[in-house]
Image: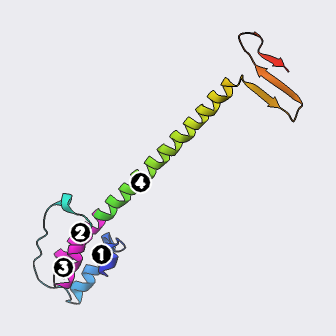
Amino acid sequence: MMSDIRNNVLRGNELEILIGNLQAENLLLDKAFNPRGGVEQWDEDYLEFLQLGFVSDYFSEPYLRHFGEVAEHVFTRKRRKRRVMVGAIAAVLLAVIALSCLFARNLREKKGGVVDYGHIGQTYARSTPATGSAYQLG
């Protein structure tokens, strides 16, 4: 159960139903739970600390709610980082492709712009200042 909450499998309404069931069966302790720090300190280490707190008898309603909130926050932050990383990789790949295309075009223009249509049996040269025509049959 705690690993499901930690991995964000049990969250929101499902967590509330679980808490309600545990209260109905009188399985929750009436202990107070005081969370440490604020949202900016919620990370994997704090989540692990909370999971270990379950073992050391903090099994109460406020504890479970807080554990669920922290788990959801950490999961959301990880997902956001992953999306940013995927976006950055995609941007780099697009830049590499664009630069490769520009480099290939520049290289082709330096060779005189000759386009070989070998399957037709003719070669066309693009317009140059010396010829003045749009295409020259070669």
- Magenta-tinted stretch: 46-73
Which of labels 3 and 2 is toward the front? Answer: 2
Which of labels 1 and 4 is toward the front? Answer: 4
**Residue annotated with mark 4:** 83
Please state if 137 lies on the left or on the right of 33 as rendered: right
Q: For label 1, count other residues whose C-alpha is less than 10 Å away and answer few (under 14), some (14-19) or many (20+).
A: some
Q: Compare residues 79 and 111 and report the one nearer the observer.
A: 111
* Local SS, label 2: helix
Seen in the picture, residue 93 relative to 28 is either above or below; the reply is above
Q: Which residue is drawn at 62% across and 27% down?
A: 106
* Local SS, label 3: helix
**Residue annotated with mark 1:** 15
Residue 80, labelled with which disc? none
Q: In which quarter of the image is residue 47?
A: bottom left
**Residue annotated with mark 2:** 45
Which of labels 4 and 2 is toward the front? Answer: 2
